[in-house]
Image (spheres, rainbow, N blue to C red):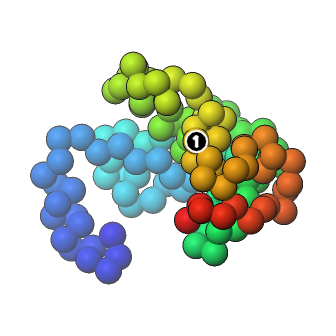
């Protein structure tokens, strides 16, 4: 990847398996053994935490096309196979979001109700 494209490509060739998720068919997707189609921002919920302590939880504006997935969906599907007994992952995304927000005293449900975002002290 930029700025060390040559090093990245050399390293890539030593991997046993490369899976890529993207919204476009990039060069990386073409080189991967498996490409997972990724939702665009308008099709997925996104949690953002900025260095200033400001947080936001955007909601999908439109449903995903076809069988496209969000990064969260992909992570939770992998986690269910890699570490099926992990108690935090087993509770689902909403509970994990509450866990992330815990230092601020906010919950994911509160953040969801404030589309413009909220200040969440203790979150970086």
Q: Nearer the viewer, residue 53 or 41?
A: 53
For image coordinates 64% across by 41% down, the residue present is 98
- Quadrant the N terminus occupies: bottom left
* Observer able to see residue 40: no
SS under mark 1: helix
For image coordinates 46% across by 24% down, the residue present is 87
Coordinates of residue 61 in the picture (x, y in percent): 83, 48
Q: Nearer the viewer, residue 118 or 121?
A: 121
Judge left or right: residue 10 versus residue 8.
left
Which residue is most to the top?
Answer: 85
Q: Nearer the viewer, residue 111 or 122?
A: 122
Q: Is residue 97 above or below residue 82?
A: below
Q: Is residue 14 above or below residue 75?
A: below
* Observer able to see residue 107: yes
Coordinates of residue 38 in the picture (x, y in percent): 57, 46
Q: Which quadrant holds residue 11?
A: bottom left
**Residue identified by numbered label 1:** 99
Judge left or right: residue 91 versus residue 1.
right
Q: Which quadrant holds residue 19?
A: top left
Judge left or right: residue 92 versus residue 66.
left
For image coordinates 54% across by 56% down, the residue present is 24
- Quadrant the C terminus occupies: bottom right
Coordinates of residue 18 in the picture (x, y in percent): 29, 45
Structural crowding at the residue carrying mark 1, measured as other residues with C-alpha within 10 Å and reported as few (<14), some (14–19) or many (≥20): some
């Amino acid at each position: 990847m930029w700025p060390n494209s040559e090093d990245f490509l050399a390293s890539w060739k030593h991997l046993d398996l490369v899976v890529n998720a993207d919204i476009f068919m990039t060069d990386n997707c073409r080189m991967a053994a498996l490409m997972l189609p990724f939702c665009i921002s308008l099709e997925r919920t996104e949690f953002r935490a900025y260095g200033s302590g400001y947080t936001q939880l955007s909601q999908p504006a439109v449903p995903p096309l076809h069988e496209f997935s969000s990064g969260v969906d992909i992570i939770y599907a992998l986690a269910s196979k890699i570490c099926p007994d992990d108690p935090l992952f087993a509770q689902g995304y909403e509970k994990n979001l509450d866990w992330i927000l815990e230092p601020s005293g906010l919950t994911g449900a509160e953040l969801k109700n404030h589309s413009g975002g909220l200040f969440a002290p203790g979150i970086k």
